[in-house]
Amino acid sequence: MRKRVTLDGVKKLALLAVLLVALASAGVAAAVALKVKPRHVNAHLTTRVMVPKPVHTKKKAFGVFSGAYVVEKKDVRLTWKLAFTKLSGKVTGATLRQGKPGLIGTTITVLCKPCKSGKGATTLLRKSTANALDSGQAYVQLYTKSNPAGELRGQIRVKK
């Protein structure tokens, strides 16, 4: 015994297929809308912009911070790399801080402790950190045993 396919059954099946295609299209559109391009950042770290001025340092000490961040639903994902040379000693730590150039700011997060040149990682940050990064009010600071208040500092800039 074969069941007969009625016109109502075909209409229901067609309606279901149209509905599934519409939902799939909406899902793809939402995924494309949520995909945000990463914002690239960098900072040139020097001793001359340190506040307070480091006491035991070499004039040729410098560093580079580079990376990219993406603002997600609940947080900011920062992927970064840090390189430095000619410091007074081993780097005991590096922090990401919020503050204007020339002023001492507040710590957002510790990037590494201790640090080696060439180190990189991915760090999750609060969503509010994106405002500090975008507005140029975030900086990276490196610490050494000779300069526990900081030896190198560089204001973060967003590449546009």
Image: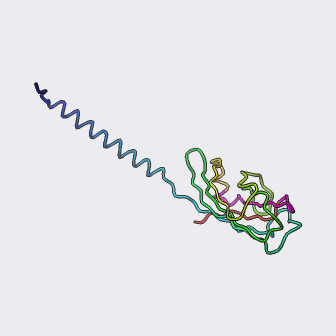
- Residue, far right: 55
Residue 20, position as x, y percentages in the image: 31, 40
Residue 69, placed above or below residue 53: above
Residue 81 picture location, percent across and down: 65, 62
Horizontal relation, residue 80 to residue 147: left or right: left
Figure quadrant of residue 69? bottom right
> 8 above or below 112?
above
Q: In which quarter of the image is residue 146?
A: bottom right
Labels in figure, total: 0
Image quarter where the C terminus lies is bottom right
Q: Does the magenta stretch include residue 143?
A: yes
Question: Residue 159: where, in percent of width, then height?
Answer: 60, 66
Tell me where the magenta segment starts and ends, as one range: 133-149
Q: If the image is split into quadrants, where does the N terminus sit?
A: top left
Residue in view at x 59 percent, y 62 percent: 40
Q: Which residue in the rendered view is the most extreme toward the bottom? A: 60
Rendered location of residue 24, percent (x, y): 35, 44
Whether residue 21 is in magenta: the answer is: no
Residue sitting at x 64%, y 59%: 80
65 and 15: which one is in front? 65
User: In front here: 142 or 70?
Assistant: 142
Q: How is the image coloured?
A: rainbow
Residue at the extreme top of the image, as rendered: 1
Residue at coordinates 80% horizontally, 68% vertically from top-left?
A: 87
**In this rendering, does residue 98 appear at all?**
no
At a point 65% along the width and 47% down the height, the residue shown is: 126
Q: Is residue 28 visible?
A: yes
